[in-house]
Amino acid sequence: MTMTKLELTYARPVTWDELEGLQKEFEGQIMYLAGGDYHPKAKDSASILIDLQELDLDQVGFAEDAIYIGGLINLQQLGDALESADLKEAISIEAGVNLRNSLSLTNYVKSSNGRSVVQICLNAMEAEYRLSGEEDGQAHSEALKAKLAEDFIEELWIPKPISLAFASVGRSPKDQPVVAVAASKRSDDRIHIACGGSEAMWAEFDLYHAEGDGENKIREFYKDINDQWAGAEYRQEVAAVLLSRCLQKLTQDSNTKEES
Amino acid sequence: MKLYLLINDRTYETECRPSESLLEVLRRLGFLSVKSGGCVRGECGACTVLMDGEPINSCMFLAVQAQGHSLETLEQFGQHPEQGWKKTEGYDPIQKAFIESGSIQCGYCTPAMILAAKALLRQNPDPTEAEVREALSGVLCRCTAYVKPVQAVLQAAADIRQSEQHSSDDEAVEQVYEPEIFAVDAIPETETIGKSEIKVDAAKLAQGKPAFTADLQLPGTLVAKVLRSPYAHARIISIDASKAKELPGVAAVLTWEDLPRVAYSTAGQSDPIPGPLDMFSLDNKVRFVGDRVAFVAAETAEIAEKALELIDVTYEPLPVIVDPRDAMKEGAVRIHDEDDYVNFGDSDPAINLAAKIRIDIGDVEKGFAEADRIFEQEYVVPKVQQVHIEPHVTLTYWDEDDRLVIRTSTQVPFHVRRQMAPVLGLPVKRIRVIKPRIGGGFGNKQEVLIEDVAAHLTIVTGRPVLYEMSREEEFIASRARHPMRIRMKTGVKLDGTMTANEMTALSDTGAYGCHALTVTGNTGQKTMGLYVGDGEYRKHPNIRFYADIVYTNTTPAGAYRGYGVPQGYWPLDRHLENIARALGLDPIAFRLKNALRPGEVQPFSTAWNEGREPVPEIIMTVGLEQATAEGRKAIGWDDKFGNEAWHTVPGKPHLRRGIGIATVMQGTAIPNLDMGGASIKINEDGSFNLLVGATDLGTGSDTVLGQIAAETLGVGLEDIIVTSSDTDTTPFDVGAYASSTTYISGTAVLKAAKDVAQRIKQRAAQLFEDKGEVVEPADLILKDRHAVSPSGSKISMAEIALDSLHWRNQEQIMATASYVSPNSPPPFAAQFATVLVDIETGQVTVEDLIMAVDSGVIINPIAASGQIEGGVAQALGYGVSEEMRYDAEGQPRERDLVDYHIFRADEMPAIRSIFVQTYEETGPYGAKAVAEIPLDGAAPAIGNAVLDACGADVFENPLTPERIWRALKFNSESKTDG
């Protein structure tokens, strides 16, 4: 007779020591509950659900060099924490109010793809993610997403300055885009660009004021991205337009700051 | 495990599995206002609750995660102010505003909206409209376009501020819910007709009462799941369900080997079904990704899903047809090769042809020969989904008399009973179908789609079975609007007179032929029939409509509000716009010059009647000219059209504004076929029970039928107790489709009410005589709950009721009537749109949509305007964002409400409805239909507005950014002008 595991243990540790104890005891059988998820479903391999909500992972810390954000913060809180109108717009495209009140950052990053506009914005701002038990942070990648199937984000940080320009094109004002570009001016005067709009594809690159080859780079990225959502030729053309708009906006923002 | 949940300030202790979602546990605890929209990514918001004061989706948390948090559901809010001897504080101000504003159509998302509004108003008592829209952005509504819910929240906020005196100088805010109405014909004075009565089901839906199919929780109910095909076309070589059957908690697994093989159609239509019988409950062949393979019933949804994974199926994949242009090619694989396929009309499964239409009116070739110019162009319209927020859901059980009860979310309860009987091996008399409230249907529940799944499982287990489709199943395995490829050819004289008009359609019915013939017939009938030409051509129009409706290995198409007509107006009206521009004619004048006028024959009525004998019909009421005039004023056409300054956006050269129009016609019921029945009886207090077979799917038909009864009987709507859609207790009705309910069922109600009124007058005359006043029954009028004599003396309805039921010559005053109409008087409308186009990216933003409608006399203006607003919003999606696509293997691209985007509250354009009232003599109190016409015009009007904005002539909808961009870049390549 086939046996299927339908019974699970549930634990809600209130200290990190307690969490460590559970991690040792149930190694390889753990499923973390890291806040709200698109479709919470217990994995077959899990014998324990460890709920992380009491571990203060929904805090935001402001330091001189970066903003530090807990992995259980939800998308609404993320938008509130970072004073960026463009990020707020991206969050609004990503989700209506209920969903952004529900979905945690960990679970968002885990499920993100090339059409996830908040992720594109985080990538532009060079966010780094530190998973549980790890010392160092890492940039967003497919490898990070794969790890999140078994792990959670303890902390995310966004290096200052918080600067962001975002533009996208979809079928309606709040539709998931077919082309999306985000740009962020970094402290060393680089401009970091992230783009997407196709589920399987992401790209990031740097621009320097002197270089001026952003259009070529972005066209290069989109040159083979043909799918049912849009053609490569269209994406190349439009991405170049969106990039130019983002760069223009960064310049305007920068001028406004200088004036004030 | 033990779980403690703090819900509505009370702690609930319950046993739960750690893997159960908060949504599941809340519903199990009886908080049935929390709905499951079947979604898998939290995108619909129907399951909203407040957690620590914030709106969240309860499907996105396990119940265990909610322990220690404060939860709120709608159950804790207000209630009916009078509960017998107990008085309550009444409704919450938000509930009250929702009820009064007409915000509640199907009511499925209402609890979620009210909770979202509650959270907003606690934090922000004086929100702007944009803030209200933002607050509602997490709850998808397919009925209202959010117009009235947004107004309701603003009104509630104002009412709360007033009552709490947040602002001492706050002026009373009164939202205007009533639409503008202009009279074309003289309309007789009435008491209840024409009044925006509150919907008879609004209060219960505002309280989130358990009114829907899945809200009935019977002990021992099993949960059904369906194993669906991963292949678009394959033969099932073997199925081994033994492992699934052995799984603890599984009650039954059914495969094609277990069930009798009965060919049927899922199209819920009158007998005989006007289409092929090509469907089986389960078959040894699958014909699209998502086709049924096996049914499972288990103690929980989780177990049922596990069991599906344990069914071992071996498939032999077959060649796949995705593009309808390949379906009839020589050597194409045959999708229906079963011996027991039952043909209808010209269907021919050997060539993948589900239906064929050939209609010639007049002499089309002569008409072309007489033309100065001939215009030809091919247009493409997409497959789109109805997206009712309540999924298809059915609960079946044996009652104490061994009769099978099917409680189901359907638009066609009587067709369900008739069509399911042979499939289940039961006589009609042993089946009872009950339709509770429906969370939207829009045609998709005109399909007898899932009742057999639950019923077969009840038959095999003897237990109640609940089957609710998931959102993914809705996308891949329910029904959709037929996609079509349509070629237009139109002959025109230089003065704009149309001499001949030809439409040739290739329609894709998907894997099964449900509604294939009738939907596509409408594509020609209700579009091409609007334009007859001018002068002599009015008497002898030259019109041709040819269509092939073919099978492909994609999700079956079926009925979707508008029923084939929106498919026709995209090509027709886009084509007319281009002709007008090419000839330098005013686009509005050109349309009206050639449009049908009062007293003319609907040309298609001479040649087509949905596969039955045609009956020529003269159209008496046509308010198109007046509708166009009022819409033109409201949108500011004369200030915008041709005004270059208006088309530009200062400082933003990449943005261009545009304005467009489309003029449209629908139908009102299927003549000589659609029949509705009604029964009315008096009660001791002078109230009445109105029993109708008609199906209110959120449209307000129960209310409208109640108003017709109330008007005729001289009582208030609150004196009419409406019971609808139960095959055991209500008279027959074909159901809610073809815009028939107000006209057909309404006339049945009117007839029954007149009979009852006549009997009441007879009894009243006797009572007057007893009091010394001799009057003829015919001289009495019924008004304000009384029979009133010519002298002004009165006898109350309650006294007449008591006299008839208790005092003497006792009788039950009652009447039953039915109605089938020889007419189908069409509603007409002018749809206007303004847009903003980004010419660098192709992105279009629709700014305004105004629809001016001639639907005859409007029986309930707020309800009718809600129909227009919601319908226009669906048509907006058809215009710009909605589309279902398949890859070469037949794998669907859209499986959720993220990829298939419907508009949210915070991105809607301004939508407005206007009515121009004609008086249709054949309709009840002058009414025609209103429900489907709003689907017809928005897409072409937007397409025409995009053309006006920037010259992008797009022939395929939706108007995606890329299509507009390509049209701008390669505009002239595909256009032909003979």
Image (cartoon, grey):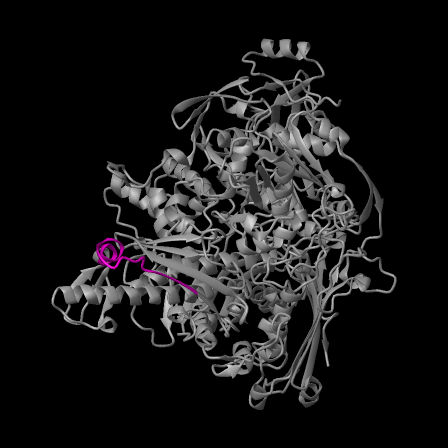
Using the image, determine if residue B328 lies above or below residue B978: above
B809 in the magenta segment: yes
Residue occupying the far left of the picture: B772
In the image: residue B77, left or right of residue B787 = right
Asked if residue A254 shows in the view, the reply is no
Position of the C terminus of chain B, as image quadrant, is: bottom right
In depth, the one of B547 and B596 nearer the eye is B547
Spot occupied by residue B644 in the image (x, y as percentages of width and height):
53, 70
Question: Residue B350, image x and y in percent?
Answer: 82, 63
Q: Work out which residue is located at the far front of the displayed protein and give it.
A: B809
Q: Classify residue B624 as left or right of residue B773.
A: right
Q: Nearer the viewer, residue B77 or B972?
A: B77
Is residue B958 placed above or below B173 in the rendered structure? Answer: below
Q: Vertically, is A64 above or below A163? A: above
Q: Is residue B670 left or right of residue B90?
A: right
Is B896 magenta? The answer is no
- Is residue B413 visible in the rendered image? The answer is yes
Q: Which residues are magenta?
A: B800-817
Image quadrant in which the N terminus of chain B is located: top right
Image coordinates of residue B548 in percent, x first then y, are 73, 68
Position of B820 with respect to B971 (left or right) is left
Residue B716: name its quadrant.
bottom left
Indicate the position of residue B12 as horizontal and vertical percent values: 44, 22
Residue visible at 41% across and 36% down? B74
Q: For residue B484, which quarter of the picture?
A: bottom right
